[in-house]
Image (spheres, helix red, strand yellow):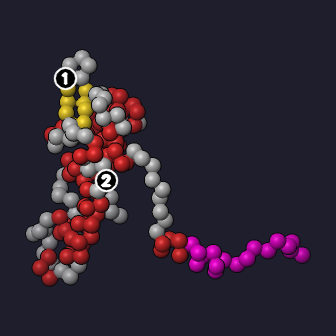
Amino acid sequence: MLRISKLADYGTMVMSQMASNPDRLFSANDLAVTLGLGRATVSKVLKSLARHELVASVRGLHGGYALARPPQQITVADVVDALEDQPFGLTECSATSGNCDIETSCHVRTNWQKISLIVRRALEGVTPADMIQPTPVEQPVVLHRLRAAAAQTMPAQSTGSAQ
């Protein structure tokens, strides 16, 4: 299964919450309570986002964290980059070279690189501000066809009683 890490997911949640009110200062505690996450986790996420200049910390009694730039100028790819430990890629060899013994003779590596680039561009095209807007989920055509085929092959249910 291809997945981003939990921290990257939580980072997207934090950034989306902050994008919903971009002029506000947010405390780690308020974000944790609002999002249902642990305070330590939110603090860790915020510190990493701050290191990558996606959020800015404001010290003091009424301090907290704010977006470092307008939410439309931050992408989900930025958030993933800030919270993942390695370069983006769906496979290890699509992110970096020199990690595999069969790399030079592999026939699928370039296609994984192509797929990774497509996914990367998709992440670059979505902002945390976009993430707070609900969008309809489109069912893949394949899933729709499988369900239709299954429905056709199922025996019709009898409405009569057995004798």
Callout 1 crowding tier (Cα within 10 Å): few <14, some 14–19, many ≥20: few
State the residue at coordinates (45%, 53%).
135
Residue type at numbered disc 2 = Val
- Residue bearing the label numbered 1: 59
69 is higher (above) or lower (below) than 8? above
What stretch of residues is rendered in magenta?
146-163
Position above or below: 155 against 133:
below
| Res 117 quadrant in image | bottom left
The N terminus: image quadrant: bottom left
Q: Camera-side residue: 40 or 134?
A: 134
Q: Is residue 155 magenta?
A: yes
Q: Residue at x 32, y 58 (%)?
A: 3
Q: Which residue is disc 2 drawn over?
A: 126
Coordinates of residue 116 in the picture (x, y in percent): 25, 66
Q: Is residue 58 above or below residue 1?
A: above
Residue extending furthest toward the top: 61
Q: Quadrant of the C terminus?
A: bottom right
